[in-house]
Image: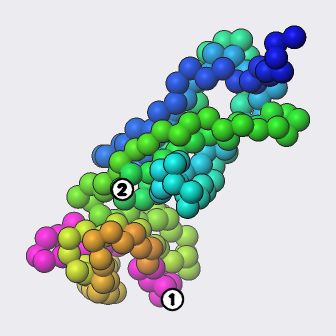
Amino acid sequence: NDGGSVALPVSLMDLSAEVDQENNRVLVKWSTATEVNNDHFMVERSSLPPSDPEGEWGTLGKVTGAGNSGTVRTYSFIDERPETGTRYYRLKQTDFDGRSHYIGPVSASFHPSKRVFQLYPDPAAEGEPVYMDIHGNEQKSIVVVVYNILGEETFSKVIPLSNSEHRLTAIDPEAKLLPGIYMIVVSSNGLVN
């Protein structure tokens, strides 16, 4: 008898969270030496340290496990919408029988690059609104102007911001823009993106 200890279904080699500053995202990577009946991993994130009793973990996504493996397996998950500041990441590993255990956490300190916005979907389908995902910056507001291919202004909007705000706003909420190619100019205090 080994004193009641149970072998874990996954032998983890490493777990890391790396900031991809150029693309404003965090890459969570891990590798296993062996896996036994490993169904999947859930990638979770928290804004508070694991020692904080108020900390809550939110699920970001699911990565399918190898099942049974005696060789090194490498996994990754991209947090496409990291929040500004230090965030903690962990894995919830689940067996085929539904039993699970936690691996981690690791931390990453994310601060958006000078690019403070991202548009999606790109391209957009006809009648579908285009959204701008905005990370707060030192400015109090930004001005968004949409021009058609002839250089005519078709839409404009002033969007207020705060330093730490992460905001999602529709560029054309009523989907009034006709199908075509548009240029979107974002400016703040004379700086144009």
Residue 185 is one of the magenta-drawn residues: yes
Q: Name which residue lies at 35% across and 51% down.
A: 110
Which mark lies nearer to you, 2 or 1? 2
- Give the camera-side residue of 37 and 21: 37
Q: Which residue type does callout 2 highlight?
A: Gly
- CA gap, disc 2 and disc 1: 34 Å
Q: Quadrant of the C terminus?
A: bottom left
- Give the camera-side residue of 153 and 53: 53
Q: Is residue 93 left or right of residue 159?
A: right
- Image coords of residue 114 (percent x, y): 23, 58
Residue 56 circle label: none
- Image coords of residue 170 (percent x, y): 45, 79
Give residue 191's quadrant in the image: bottom left
Q: From the image, tell me which residue sits under label 1.
A: 174
- Give the camera-side residue of 2 and 119: 2
- Image coords of residue 120 (percent x, y): 46, 65
Q: Name which residue lies at 63% across and 16% down.
A: 33
- Please indicate, yes or no, whether residue 183 appears anywhere in the rendered image: no
Q: From the image, tell me which residue sits under label 2.
A: 85
Give residue 58's quadrant in the image: bottom right
